[in-house]
Image (cartoon, rainbow, N blue to C red):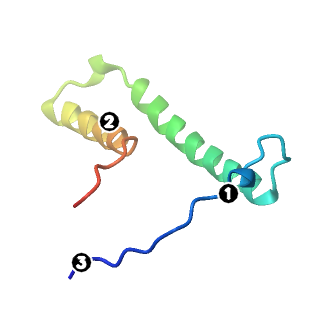
Amino acid sequence: MAPKVIGVRKTDPSAYNPNRPAGLLLQAQAAHLREALIKHVHEVTTLINVDLKSLKTEADISAYVHRATALLHTRHARPATK
């Protein structure tokens, strides 16, 4: 069974006014995004600060690569599924 397609009208160009003061909803969204970014900055900084010479075993390297790869994969958009 094919998925049902629902038509959505285009947004009126006058709906966006770059000079209009931002409302509380947009301000809250910006605050939430900032909190998410702060968390990721901490994670990235933690990985960058690892002294690679301290990784002596395959298990050490494996754990580092696993953490770094997982962090990078969360940064990329996932391809659309068919």
Residue at figure coordinates x 32%, y 35% from the top left: 68
**Relative to 39, residue 25 above or below:** below
Give the structural element (helix, strand or loop) at label 2.
helix
Q: Which amino acid does the dot numbered 2 rest on?
A: Ala
Q: Give the residue number, with chain letter if any, for mark 2.
A: 68
Q: Which mark is residue 2?
A: 3
Task: Give the mark nearest the N terminus, 2 or 1.
Answer: 1
| Quarter placement of the C terminus | bottom left
Q: Which amino acid does the dot numbered 1 rest on?
A: Asp
* In this picture, residue 40 sits left or right of residue 71: right
* In this picture, residue 60 sits left or right of residue 77: left
Q: Looking at this view, name the residue that lies furthest to the top.
A: 53
**Relative to 36, residue 24 above or below:** below
Asked if the residues shown at circle 2 and circle 3 are in contact, with their CB atoms under 8 angstroms apart, the answer is no
Task: Give the mark nearest the N terminus, 2 or 3.
Answer: 3
Residue 31: percent from left, percent from top: 70, 49
Residue 39 location, quadrant: top right
- Between marks 2 and 1 in the image, the one whose residue lies nearer the viewer: 1
Q: Which amino acid does the dot numbered 3 rest on?
A: Ala
Q: Give the residue number, with chain letter if any, for mark 1.
A: 12
* Label 2, residues with CA under 10 Å away: few <14, some 14-19, many ≥20: some
**Relative to 18, residue 16 above or below:** below
Q: Nearer the viewer, residue 3 or 64?
A: 3
Question: Disc 1 versus disc 3: distance between alpha carbons?
Answer: 30 Å
Question: Disc 2 versus disc 3: distance between alpha carbons?
Answer: 39 Å
